[in-house]
Image: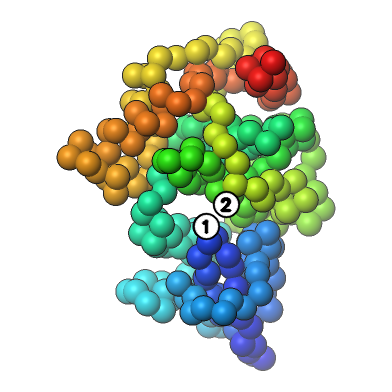
Amino acid sequence: MNKLNRKIYLSIFERYILVKVNSEELYKMICHVYGAMITQKPECEPHLSYLLNKIDNDNMSITNVGDNLHSVTSSISELLFLFEKDMTIELQKIRSDLLFIHSAALSIGGEVILLVAPSGSGKSTTAWAMINSGFKYLSDELAPIDLDSLTITPYPHALCLKAIPPLFNLPEDTLYTSHTIHVPIKQYCDFNVSSLKAIFYLEFNAEILEPEIYSISTAEATANLYANSLNILAHNENDNGLNAAVNVASRVENYRLVSNKLDKTCLKIKSLIESINS
């Protein structure tokens, strides 16, 4: 097997990550999923370094050079999962000043909204529908909030789906693995650090006739935000991070979004944001 020694530099949350790969397959995979984050070689040393190696025709490995992570897998989808999981955990340590929310983030008119929900609730599918309805893409998974300015820093990896969406065709260069679908998203990205306007707590209900949006109290929003924060204890001021959640929830609009039909859901969200700004 002809082995390569390729280097990819990623810029994420103003930090640099070096990814070394030894095969063209892995090089193309990283460029596909993280292409919107690729940058030139930085003048400083990378904050994180990874080795992704093709061992043989069946197996690949991932190593975090500065930590204890070393795993071997035969699955591209698992390799991507291990890489992203470790990288995002490490970034939460490095940028502990930010509050990381498990959330999709999209913008319209220069303002950001979050779609907050547990895994498997349809965040990425809804985000894809919203992109096709005039919204710009910041992330489908991770929303880091600056607690002073309430700005959101983009995390524009390829949008990750677990199934083909019911609306809006996927582009031809979409990457399909055994368990995931990765949609290249660079052309739809908002690369600006923008202010958070509203948070929608998303749930799906096939039984309702139309999508429904309800305004919720700051207390309810705080509880939901706290439950969906990834590093809330990093913001502990003798209150286990509660004040950080209150800080965000009390300064934005908060809604419960019950979704079923994606096109109508997008129209309702857009109409609501326009009414808030009018």
- Mark 2 / mark 1, whichever is N-terminal: 1
> Residue shown at 34%/47% (left/top)?
231
Image quarter hosting the C terminus = top right
Mark count: 2
- In this rendering, position of residue 169 left or right of residue 264: right
Q: Percent position (x, y) of residue 135?
A: 72, 34
Q: Secondary structure at mark 1?
A: loop
Q: Do tag 2 and tag 1 residues touch (Cβ < 8 Å)? A: yes
Which residue is denoted by mark 2 in the rendering? 155
- In this rendering, position of residue 242 left or right of residue 263: left
Q: Percent position (x, y) of residue 150?
A: 49, 38
Amino acid found under the numbered disc labelled 2:
Tyr
| Residue 213, quarter of the rendered image | top right
> Residue shown at 42%/74% (left/top)?
64
Residue occupying the far front of the picture: 148
Residue occupying the far left of the picture: 238
Up the image or down, 216 lies above or below 1; here it is above
Question: Does the image show residue 173?
Answer: yes
> Residue shown at 49%/21% (left/top)?
254
Q: Percent position (x, y) of residue 78?
A: 50, 61
Q: How is the image coloured?
A: rainbow
| Residue 218, quarter of the rendered image | top left
Which residue is denoted by mark 1 in the rendering? 13
Quote the CA–CA distance across marks 2 and 1: 8 Å
